[in-house]
Amino acid sequence: MKKIECTKSLRELILTAFDSTEYPGDDNIVLGAYPPNMPDYMAVYNLYNGHKWNSFSDSFFYSHGEVQSSIEFLTPKAFLYYLPAFMLHIISDEWSNDINGLIVDIFSGLDYTKNSTTSLIFTQMNEMQFKCVALFLDFIFSNSDIYTGFYVEELEEIINEYWWQFL
């Protein structure tokens, strides 16, 4: 019962903390040229273009294979914008650890040691969003048997290197 209550509270916090996040603009979805002209970039662009982060259902994450590897194609602004959708999906009842590429890419995007100088995550989030992401990472770590499997050590390092200060 405790996990269910924590999941509900975390979901509400994510929805509230990121409610006012601005859409990055059609020209700021994927890295590289706009409009995208390479097949992978075009596929990712078409997945996200014009969609608000809070419009994605869990089925979206399973209906498009590109979603699982899309994070590496997103601009930093798009990653920040769609981060709450990714977090909500991961803590949902629909989450399946069988497709853990998404969670690994999220960890990478939130790794301060890899991204501190280039990522908008560390320069444009507000205090509530920082706390929300930290609580999300801590929740995933606390339930690592469900979410991370053998990525638990990587997640622990990410939390200890930066995110602990918001807990």
Image (tube, helix red, strand yellow):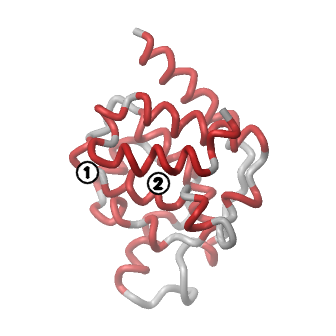
Identify the image quadrant of residue 50.
bottom right
Image quarter hosting the N terminus: top left
Q: Amino acid at mark 2?
A: Phe
Q: Any mark on residue 67, and which?
A: none
Residue at image location 45% in from the left, 70% down from the top = 72
Q: Amino acid at mark 1?
A: Ile
Q: Any mark on residue 107, and which?
A: 2
Residue at image location 42% in from the left, 42% down from the top = 57
Residue at image location 37% in from the left, 41% down from the top = 58
Residue 38: x and y in percent read: 40, 89
Query: Local crowd at mark 2 within 10 Å, few (<14), some, or many (≥20)?
Result: some
The residues bearing labels 2 and 1 have C-alpha atoms spaced at a distance of: 14 Å
- Residue position for label 1: 99
Q: Is residue 117 above or below residue 62?
A: below
Between disc 2 and disc 1, whose residue precedes? Answer: 1
Query: Local crowd at mark 1 within 10 Å, few (<14), some, or many (≥20)?
Result: few
Residue 88: x and y in percent read: 48, 39
